[in-house]
Amino acid sequence: MTQTMGTLIVLLSTGMWGISGVCGQYLFEHTQIDSTWLIAVRQILAGLMYMMVIVQRGKEPLFAIFRAQRQTLWKMLFFTLGLLGSQYGFYYAIKLSNAPTATVLIYTAPVFVVLQQVLMQHRPVEKKEAVGIFTALMGVFLVSTHGNPTSLVISPAALFWSILSAIAMTLYTVAPAHILKEYSSPYLMGWGQLLSGFILLPLCNPFHSGVESWTFFSIGAMGYIIVFGTVVPFLMYFNGLKVIGPVKASLISCSEPLCSVLFSVAFLGTFLALPDYLGVVCIVGTVVMLSLKLD
């Protein structure tokens, strides 16, 4: 796979994630769905789908990861906790605010990724990384505040869960970099999703979603979140991650807020002011700049 193909795969996967956030907002606005139930069921069903892929391929023993070295098990644990924290924080922040706000706030994640790389590798920040981070954060700032820091209307809880999701996103982006050389993306994601879902089960009633009556659209939104908001994009993202690396993957994934904003406007009637569009330009500019640099 070429660098350009890896870039396109990561870009498409983050677009799917952006739409899944809008589907989550739709469920929270039009049903009484329990957020913990939503995330737990999403993780478990997605994990089972990955397991089906693993069994069908027949290339990896299903329980091989549990016989791995201690260092690999620790990385798997961090990966699982990163998945759990990022997904729970993301959807709970959507419940407390909305999809565009939660999405743009979690894209402070590239800052944490670069800081982790700089500290662990004892290296300075590269110029293009610094420019990319600045441009992406400027876009996040404009979309979330309309250019005025005092205009950010968000509860402290929503802010907390959004930032927690960003930090956790760093874990599942960086942690699998080495174990992806030993295990396939479906294998790693399957166990990560399944285990993170089971961790949440004690915190909800698995037989009570909170939805009084499932409609065609609510079922469709839930189905999209599981399949096209989880299984498909995660597979694509980590295949691209192996080619372009964690820092570039995190920076390119800043296009997710773009999709979230656009689909919120189109389907949920979210209003966009001029600073929102300027923020979108910044985020798209980051993606274009990195794409041109990768070849």
Image (cartoon, rainbow, N blue to C red):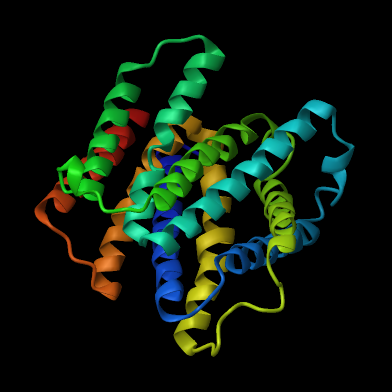
Q: How many marks?
A: 0
Q: Residue 174, relative to residue 45: is it above or below? A: above
In this picture, residue 109 sits left or right of residue 50 = left
Q: Position of residue 272 (x, y in %)?
A: 17, 60
Question: Looking at the image, which is closer to me, 237 or 102?
Answer: 102
Q: In the rendered view, does 245 fall on the left or right side of 199?
A: left
Q: Residue furthest front?
A: 156
Q: Give the image location of residue 103, x and y in percent.
A: 38, 52
Q: Quadrant of residue 45?
A: bottom right
Q: Is residue 206 above or below residue 180?
A: below
Residue 7 occupies quadrant: top left
The residue at the point 51 percent across, 15 percent down is 119
Residue 281 visible in the displayed image: no
Q: Residue 32's x, y, as percent?
A: 50, 78
At 70% from the left and 46% from the top, the residue drawn is 188
Along the line of sight, the residue nearer the viewer: 13 or 223: 223
Rendered residue at 49%/58% (across/down): 92
Side of 105 where 17 appears, left or right:
right
* Rendered location of residue 68, percent (x, y): 85, 34
Q: Quadrant of the C terminus?
A: top left
24 to 55, vertically: above or below? below
In this view, the residue farthest toward the right is: 67
